[in-house]
Image (cartoon, helix red, strand yellow):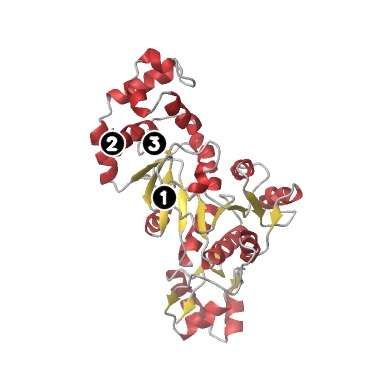
Amino acid sequence: MDNTEQMKYDYWWAGMDRAYPGSVKKTALSAGGTKHLYEMDREELINLEGISEKYADDIIKKRQNWNLDAEYEKLLSMGIDFIPYYDVRYPERLKMTQGHPFGLFCKGSLPPGDVYCVAVIGARNCSEYGRMMARRFASDLAGYGVTIVSGMAYGIDGISQEAALNAGGRSYAVLGCGVNTCYPASNRVLYERLKENGGVLSEYGIYTKPSARLFPARNRIISGLADILLVVEAREKSGTMITVDMALEQGREVTVIPGRITDPLSTGCNRLIKQGATPVMSAEDIMYMLDESFDNNRKTVKLPKVKLDKNEKKVYELLEPYARSIGDLSEASGLELKDVICSLVELGIKGLAAETGKGYYVRTRECLAV
């Protein structure tokens, strides 16, 4: 059987609906391969470890409605690549972790093995402080040539990935559904950008819809692809902590951005520090952990150039990650309020500024004003 034929059977097995995918590879190996699994009768399937009578019935039903050739051609026509664990393209970091996926579905590209990778995770309902830190760290790390991986979720995940792309870097999202589904739908723009400047990955087949039960398992892929895990903001009991536990089991270094002890969204981060996680105050702290010979004057990714007029440039240079009022900006710049407001509107259109509260603005990304 040639590689293409083998891939068709592997794709069928990888796309099977299942609550937790950890035993996919183990079952395939115990059966002597996915082709044998495809050809087994009900009794033979039930005799395999981990396959119940109900699961055996599901497998039989699935393959009765599955055309190996047509389904594989459909996958390729959608621009989706399937990479089984034995493929030379399969990420080495991930392959070295216990319980790695049987295969990965990919839109875009795979994370390069010769580039440092940091997983950035945190709260969905994050604070302005969390947003600011996610943007700053992801942007600076991308500026140093580091790949950012996360889950493309609301909050810290999506913010950090967008910041990495805005800084000219690359980012990869791991989904808890098929890669042909943008979840959450509100991150459609980010989803499209990731396909062009990184990739969208999943171990779930194209017919798998988003489901809460699938997300904990995908977190092991996020941490498994990374050299270091960075927790930006998290409550003491949250999904973020599941990823932290998985990262520790995989032998990954866990780094944390400290927060005020009175902030509920920093309770988890501060608790992790108390338990031994490494607190970091800048992207440079992480770079030195990745590379002892790191030179913090060396950035490998240039900031994008954005054309700004005189007033826009003046206002942009005054903006900070912390919110500043229109009145404060007017006083500091020497511009009339109306000119500041016009400049902020233009900066917002160009993705360089955002209103965080009525009359208060922050800088959302770094650029070279020209």
Residue at the extreme front of the image, as rendered: 1
The secondary element bearing badge 2 is classed as loop
Residue type at numbered disc 2: Asp
Q: Determine the residue positioned at 49% across, 57% down.
A: 114
Q: Position of residue 240 (x, y in %)?
A: 60, 45
Q: Is residue 17 above or below residue 149?
A: above
Cα gap from disc 2 to disc 3, whole angstroms: 28 Å
Q: Hey, what amino acid is under mark 1?
A: Val
Q: Residue furthest top?
A: 43
Residue at the spot of label 2: 2
* Residue 95 on image: x %, y %: 50, 43
Q: Nearer the viewer, mark 2 or mark 3?
A: 2
Q: Tell which tag, 1 or 3, sits nearer the viewer.
A: 1
The answer, for residue 70, to whether it is visible in the render is yes
Q: Which mark is residue 208?
A: 3
Residue 281: image x %, image y %? 68, 63
What's under tag 3, amino acid-wise?
Thr
Above-or-below relation of 171 to 73: below
Sequence order check, earlier mark of 2 and 1: 2
Q: Which residue is mark 1?
A: 200
| Secondary element at image label 1 | strand
Whether residue 65 is situated above or below residue 226 in the rendered picture: above
Q: CA distance from mark 2 to mark 1?
A: 28 Å
Quadrant of the rendering where the C terminus is positioned: bottom left
Question: Regarding mark 3 in the picture, which secondary structure is present there?
Answer: loop
